[in-house]
Amino acid sequence: MQQTLNRDTAVNLAIFALLVATALGAHLAGNGFTVTLATKAAIFGLAGVGLNLALGYGGLISFGHAAFFGIGGYITGILASHASTGTPVLSLPFTVMGSNEMLGIWPMAMLAAGLAALVIGALSLRTSGVYFIMVTLAFAQMLYYFAISWPRYGGEDGLSFYVRNSFPGLNTFAPIQYFAICATLLAVALVFTAVVTQSRFGLALQAARQNSQRTVAVGIRPYAIRLTAFVLSGMIVGLAGSLYADLNRFVSPAMLSWHMSGEIMVFVILGGVGRLCGPVAGAALFILLEHVLGGISDYWQALLGLLLLAIVLFAPGGLIGIVTKRGRHA
């Protein structure tokens, strides 16, 4: 058992180190585009880490996490756009001004995503199985259509804010420095997930995933535990959405669509469900395939679909499962 844990830890560290080495190597070679791709992989990996907390460890197959991703993005875009014009976001019942400071925007994005996750989770978790999947999807689509019909912030065309938000002591326009911010937050999220899943709460969450009736028998309430995990998951994904909006300096309803929910789930499945760095490996592979295969054919997603099918059928533990020679997370 100890040997298996050491091997998993080594693989997790290697995956994160490879992502950082790729960005640093590209920076030294003067290849800013590759640094941006690594940054995108780190952001998508962060979103996957958030979903993995609910899906991999809690067994909550959510198809609506794009809602939290988009909320984080829109909070960032709205605050940044109002900061540039000097107009308040709200005037009543109290005044809320815009902001172009990342340290001020991130808590707002996470809080908004967390509150949305609390409401969505409180209702969705009263169902299970395919009904849970459909309810989470329905909530995300409601927010998607709301964003489309919200002309104040661009509606279907989205919202541009042109200037990337600032971070004390760093030039966020420099690709390698923005990558450093995203990679650091990814590392924090990974450590947080590792600590949470090994805590009493995390063990109870995994017990509820395996057999909820037994957890009830020993005095554990699966609903409260799952709701807490769902909220934490939404907050992490909301932070990833904030970073993604800053990366592109643009936010649109596409961040709230079911396609985005599917992509985040693909990151987790490709890398390995219930694996700490599985979403990071999956996101990096997805970005690599998108870049390489996208230049070969406009139908590169069909090739990705075949790869995903092969992993589900022959390597249920994902990429990390192949490396560590272990099947799906128990």
Image (cartoon, rainbow, N blue to C red):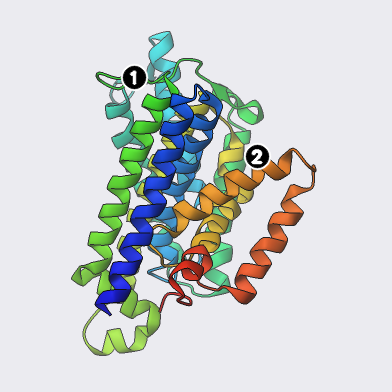
Residue 15 lies, in percent from the top left, at 41, 52
Q: Which of the 4 image quadrants contains residue 255?
A: top right
Q: Amino acid at mark 1?
A: Ser
Q: Which residue is mark 1?
A: 166
- Residue at 35% across / 32% down in the picture? 180
Going from N to C along the chain, the mark reached first, 1 or 2, is 1
- Residue at 24% across / 80% down in the picture? 220
- Residue at 37% across / 85% down in the picture? 211
Q: Is residue 118 above or below residue 60?
A: above
Whether residue 62 appears in this view of the structure is no
Q: Which residue is mark 2?
A: 291
Q: Secondary structure at mark 1?
A: loop
Residue 56 lies, in percent from the top left, at 43, 67
Q: Is residue 104 above or below residue 121?
A: above
Q: Decide: few, some or many residues near mark 2? Use Cα within 10 Å; few <14, some 14-19, many ≥20.
A: few
Q: Amino acid at mark 2?
A: His
Whether residue 67 appears in this view of the structure is yes
Front label number (1 vs 2): 2
- Residue at 39% across / 40% down in the picture? 20
Q: Decide: few, some or many residues near mark 1? Use Cα within 10 Å; few <14, some 14-19, many ≥20.
A: some
Residue 178 lies, in percent from the top left, at 39, 27
User: Residue 135 or 179: which is nearer the viewer?
Assistant: 179
